[in-house]
Image (tube, grey):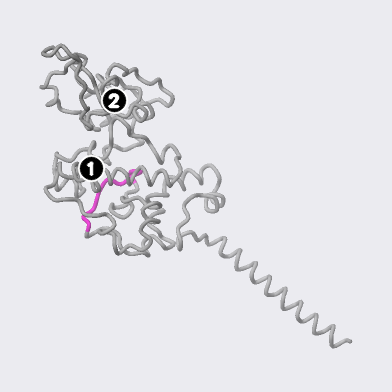
Amino acid sequence: MLGLVAYVEGQDIADNSQCLKCHGQVFYEYPNEWTGQTDRKPLNPFHHIDSVKLHTSVHKMFACIDCHSMDYETFPHSGELRLEEKYQCMDCHGGDETFAKFNFEGIEAAFMESVHYKASDERFNCWMCHDAHGYELALRQDKPIVEVVNMSNNMCLSCHDNKFKYGLLSDDEPKSINEIHAWLPNQARHFNKVRCIDCHTKVQSDILISHNILPKEEALRNCVQCHSTNSVLMESLYAHRAKESRAESGFLNAVVLNEGYIIGANRNQTLNYVSIGLFGLLVVGLIIHFMLRIIMIKRK
């Protein structure tokens, strides 16, 4: 198991400038000993690292050789290094109390129940969805919900809307996302406001984001399951934010001020009673006013 240092907010960013001289560029150059010239080649896009994302990612404090072989310090790299087995999430995070709040064990168990794992076994791994060189926390860093949704959906679309990446696991071509969801009203609004996983996973209370991707036949298609008082979105997308908001602002403010507005779902019984009471007082006031007007007219 890799010796992993505990993640500390604000920890220094590792100096990976030597690696990024090549892997941070779309093109790279090297001296060609055969021709005596400097050759310029396009870098394999799968080996390109976005240095900006790397420096804002959860792994920003690590040097490249913390996860990759030290043999990569020699250039040109040996061809055998391409066969190097990559670390998986549990190689670093499994059994470590420092990361207990993330419940990586629960995430792994849920993932192994998912349609992705069952269909592809070990060929489908964490890095298929989570880019180790650019992964950021979203919900836990209180990013706006619309940004959380965008980041999450882009993970899904990076494969389901990408013929090349989809082809790594299947001989079929990915179907059009809009065509698959033709039954869904207001598609664009749903895609911008709801994560794919909110409809395509089983809600779990023990982990922040469910990793048990369901077969397409079991995906939510019933509007009431989201647009009702017992909305599943309140147990998934908005669950963490609502919990944090209640702790900081109290129950009433959390209900009124949070981002979790869903048509048909945001009803608070106390506010309902208050509204009914105020409406009742208004009606009583109008009746009293009307009766007083009649009495005054009769007296004249």
Say which amino acid is labelled 2.
Gln
139 or 27, nearer to the observer = 27
Residue 47 occupies which quadrant of the picture? top left
Query: Residue 56: image x %, image y %?
Result: 38, 29
Does the segment drawn in magenta span residue 243?
no
In three-dimensional space, the C-alpha distance between marks 2 and 1, rounded to whole angstroms, equals 37 Å
Vertical order, 87 against 295 (above or below): above
Query: Residue 133: image x %, image y %?
Result: 30, 30
**Residue found at x 72% / y 73%:** 285
175 or 288, nearer to the observer = 175
Vertical order, 246 against 35 (above or below): below
Task: Answer left or right for 76 relative to 187.
Answer: left
Say which amino acid is labelled 1.
Ala
Neighbor class of circle 2 (other Cα within 10 Å; few <14, some 14-19, many 20+) is: some
Q: Which residue is mark 2?
A: 25
Count of numbered labels shown in the rendering: 2
Query: Residue 230: image x %, image y %?
Result: 41, 60
Q: Quadrant of the C terminus?
A: bottom right
Of callouts 2 and 1, the N-terminal one:
2
Query: Residue 114: image x %, image y %?
Result: 21, 48
Q: Quadrant of the N terminus?
A: top left
**Is label 2 in a helix, a strand or a loop?**
loop
**Residue found at x 68% / y 70%:** 281
Q: Which residue is mark 1?
A: 109
Task: Answer left or right for 55 relative to 46.
Answer: right
**Residue found at x 84% / y 88%:** 298
Neighbor class of circle 1 (other Cα within 10 Å; few <14, some 14-19, many 20+) is: few
Vertical order, 288 against 263 (above or below): below
Tag shown at residue 259: none
Vertical order, 177 against 22 (above or below): below
Q: Residues in magenta?
A: 206-216
